[in-house]
């Protein structure tokens, strides 16, 4: 009988679907999503919506730490994790209740002296106190869509626990956390960047087109790199490879922990330092580790020319200290092709062409030998200013043979070479293979 009742209820619901109700159920626009999200969060009152000053005042009044989530809408990439957080997941709700919770939904007026993070994230969390002391960060990403290898709800809970522990320490013992803020940037807020001054203001325009009035986080990195490109063409590796993933030094961490090593790549800097699976990273350069994002924060401060990271860890319950030596150009081992900001790099370097590494399935589809390495063209931009490659004659499916006489296994390496080895304004010869036939085109390095 219950089964029949459910079927009857479904039948009644279907009868209620009219043409007008179907139109009402059409996929909402970005504008509608943003406004509906704002209305929902304000009505629930669990989060302080887009008002950091109010959050700081409440933290001063209550003595609680702040949890500030940088999360715009709509951004679908980390939506699953965000829903688990916003909907008060059972594991984190008791922890959330111990924080003043602030949700910032746009980067326009974000204080970059305080909030320094990997701007290619679509979901980032800061833990801090009312005086602006940063306890730690959460939010890591190494793929355009997949996120489960980098973040988890369990990892968020562990990071929150760590932040609460630091908040309970006497003020004198929190002194070493000053390093988690880093040096002051050239521009204190994103809307001050030359790239944004004429188009954006400090605040979102809720009375107009709120979507178009928003500076997204990844656009901050775009502005920084554009300023460097305009200023001389060369993109320092600190800008080209920001907040390197731990895999750049040979570490794969468990996203359900604060910083437990899952794997160590053979022959890597981490392997040479003696790091082992199961090691629990506690401090790097004396900075407490609350999550993988904190590891990236410390790595981000190490110059591209190389440097040292002091590592304090637990191994089998015993405390150990080791030194991680990073060689010159160590950042180049990182991957930047997944980043949203890489589209601007492709415009500058390869005319809006998007190359992917050949995998076994692609080789089989193209009838290539198993040892054939290199890149194939997955997408060519069709609209200005990302359409130079398309206009030059490149076609999706082309196999890259040589770029300026060089061969490449990764798109990241191709972008780095094109951006920093070939002057702006120069054109290069690019050879591709198309259905067994060689074709040669030219691309200009753009500003």
Image: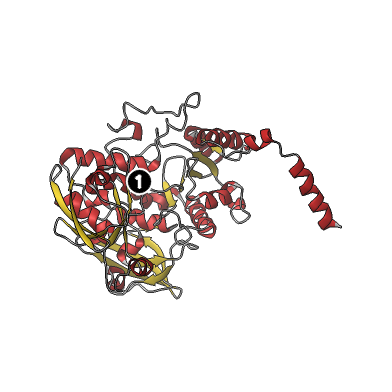
Location of residue 178 with respect to 374 vertically, above or below:
above
The one nearer the camera, 81 or 442, is: 442
Q: Position of residue 141 (x, y in %)?
A: 41, 55
Disc tally is 1
Please give left or right for residue 195 compared with residue 253 in the image. Answer: left
Seen in the image, is 165 located left or right of residue 92?
A: left
Up/down of 94 relative to 39, above or below:
below
Reading the image, the residue beneath label 1 is: 181
Looking at the rendering, which quadrant does residue 315 occupy? bottom left
Residue 3, horizontal then vertical, whole percent: 81, 57
Is residue 189 in sight in this rendering? no
The residue sitting at 47% across, 50% down in the picture is 77
Crowding around mark 1 (Cα neighbors within 10 Å: few <14, some 14 to 19, many 20+) is some
Provide residue 334's location: percent of width, then percent of height: 30, 59
Check the image and tell me how it is coloured.
secondary structure
- The residue lying toward the viewer, choosing from 66 and 62, is 66
Q: Which of 15/101 is in front?
A: 15
**Kind of element beneath mark 1:** loop
Q: Quadrant of the N terminus?
A: bottom right
Q: In the image shown, does 167 or 223 lie closer to the viewer?
A: 223
Find residue 36 and report its image quarter. top right
């Amino acid at each position: 009988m219950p089964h029949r009742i459910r079927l009857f209820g479904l039948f009644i619901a279907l009868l209620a679907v009219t043409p007008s109700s179907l139109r009402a159920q059409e996929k909402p626009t970005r504008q509608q999503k943003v406004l509906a999200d704002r209305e929902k969060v304000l009505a629930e009152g669990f989060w302080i919506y887009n008002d950091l000053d109010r959050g700081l005042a409440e933290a001063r009044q209550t003595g609680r730490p702040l949890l500030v989530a940088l999360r715009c809408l709509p951004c679908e990439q980390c939506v699953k994790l965000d829903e688990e957080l916003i909907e008060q997941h059972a594991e984190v709700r008791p922890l959330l209740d111990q924080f003043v919770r602030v949700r910032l939904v746009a980067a326009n007026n974000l204080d970059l002296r305080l909030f320094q993070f990997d701007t290619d994230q679509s979901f980032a969390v800061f833990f801090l106190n009312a005086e602006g002391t940063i306890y730690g960060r959460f939010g890591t990403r190494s793929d355009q869509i997949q996120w489960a290898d980098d973040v988890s709800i369990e990892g968020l809970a562990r990071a929150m626990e760590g932040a609460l522990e630091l908040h309970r320490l006497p003020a004198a013992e929190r002194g070493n956390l000053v390093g988690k803020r880093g040096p002051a940037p050239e521009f204190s807020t994103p809307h001050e960047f030359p790239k944004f001054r004429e188009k954006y203001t400090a605040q979102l325009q809720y009375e107009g087109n709120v979507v178009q009035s928003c500076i997204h986080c990844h656009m901050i990195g775009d502005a920084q790199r554009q300023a460097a490109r305009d200023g001389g063409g060369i993109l320092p590796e600190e800008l080209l490879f920001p907040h390197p993933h731990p895999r750049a030094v040979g570490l794969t961490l468990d996203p359900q922990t604060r910083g437990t090593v899952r794997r160590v790549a053979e022959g890597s800097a981490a392997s040479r330092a003696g790091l082992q699976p199961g090691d629990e990273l506690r401090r790097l350069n004396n900075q407490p580790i609350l999550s993988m994002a904190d590891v990236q924060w410390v790595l981000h401060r190490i110059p591209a020319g190389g440097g040292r990271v002091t590592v304090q860890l637990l191994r089998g319950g015993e405390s150990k200290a080791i030194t991680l030596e990073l060689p010159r150009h160590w950042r180049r081992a990182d991957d930047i092709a997944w980043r949203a900001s890489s589209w601007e790099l492709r415009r500058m370097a390869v005319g809006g062409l998007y190359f992917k590494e050949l995998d076994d399935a692609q080789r089989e589809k193209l009838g290539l030998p198993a040892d054939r390495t290199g890149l194939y063209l997955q997408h060519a931009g069709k609209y200005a200013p990302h359409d130079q490659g398309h206009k030059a004659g490149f076609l999706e499916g082309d196999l890259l043979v040589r770029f300026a006489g060089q061969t490449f296994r990764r798109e990241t390496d191709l972008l780095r070479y094109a951006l920093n080895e070939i002057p702006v304004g120069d054109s290069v010869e690019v050879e591709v293979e198309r259905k067994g036939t060689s074709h040669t085109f030219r691309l200009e390095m753009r500003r």
